[in-house]
Image (tube, rainbow, N blue to C red):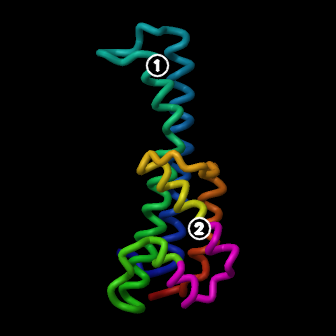
Amino acid sequence: MPSKRHEWLTRIKAVEREYKSIHYATVFLRDAVADNPSSLKGELRVRDLDEASRNLEGTYIIRLFSEFETCLRAFWMVAYGQPPTRTRDLLDGVGARRIIPFDQINNAHRVREFRNSLVHARNANVEPIPIDRARSILCHYSARLPIDW
């Protein structure tokens, strides 16, 4: 498991690049299928491809937050011992100990709440956050961790 801040930032950014790659491939495939609908094999239908495309960014938001949370848990384990069970407490605890500005902590909670709405299919009125904005928020928070731990 990485123990350097830049390695975690690289991993978080890599998830966004992976999303962009898959998004590009999806657009390319949708264009190809539009030109030749019979190119879809098996039970796949155009509507399946459209649904996958609609859900793609949410899927990668979940992965993005997972990398971020794993980073915080790895840091906490080395610095303080067993991390809190609840992710909310983990964000607040790291934020307090690393003197992260409140707005950065709050923004990270917004990403967490959006991720929760995707994972748990909650009907709460949670503001969607585009992946590039979510990555920026989580990297700004993570940049406050020590260089090595």
Instruction: State whether residue 120 is above or below residue 35.
Output: below
Q: Residue at x 31, y 16 (%)?
A: 43
Characterize the local packing of mark 1: few (<14), some (14-19) or many (20 or more) Cα atoms within 10 angstroms: few
Residue 122: where, in percent of width, then height?
Answer: 47, 48
Point out the tag, 1 or 2, that comes first from the N-terminus. 1
The residue identified by callout 1 is 47
Q: Nearer the viewer, residue 46 or 129?
A: 129
Q: Nearer the viewer, residue 6 or 48?
A: 48
Instruction: State whether residue 14 is above or below residue 123.
Output: below
**Residue type at tag 2:** Ala
Q: Which residues are magenta?
A: 92-108
Residue 19: where, in percent of width, then height?
Answer: 52, 46
The residue identified by callout 2 is 108
**Residue type at tag 1:** Arg
Residue 38: where, in percent of width, then height?
Answer: 41, 7
User: Horizontally, is 45 left or right of 110 in the view?
Assistant: left
Q: Nearer the viewer, residue 123 or 94?
A: 123
Q: For the C terminus, which image quadrant?
A: bottom left
Residue 141: where, in percent of width, then height?
Answer: 60, 74
Q: Is residue 77 magenta?
A: no
Instruction: State whether residue 20 is above or below residue 114.
Output: above
**SS for callout 1:** helix
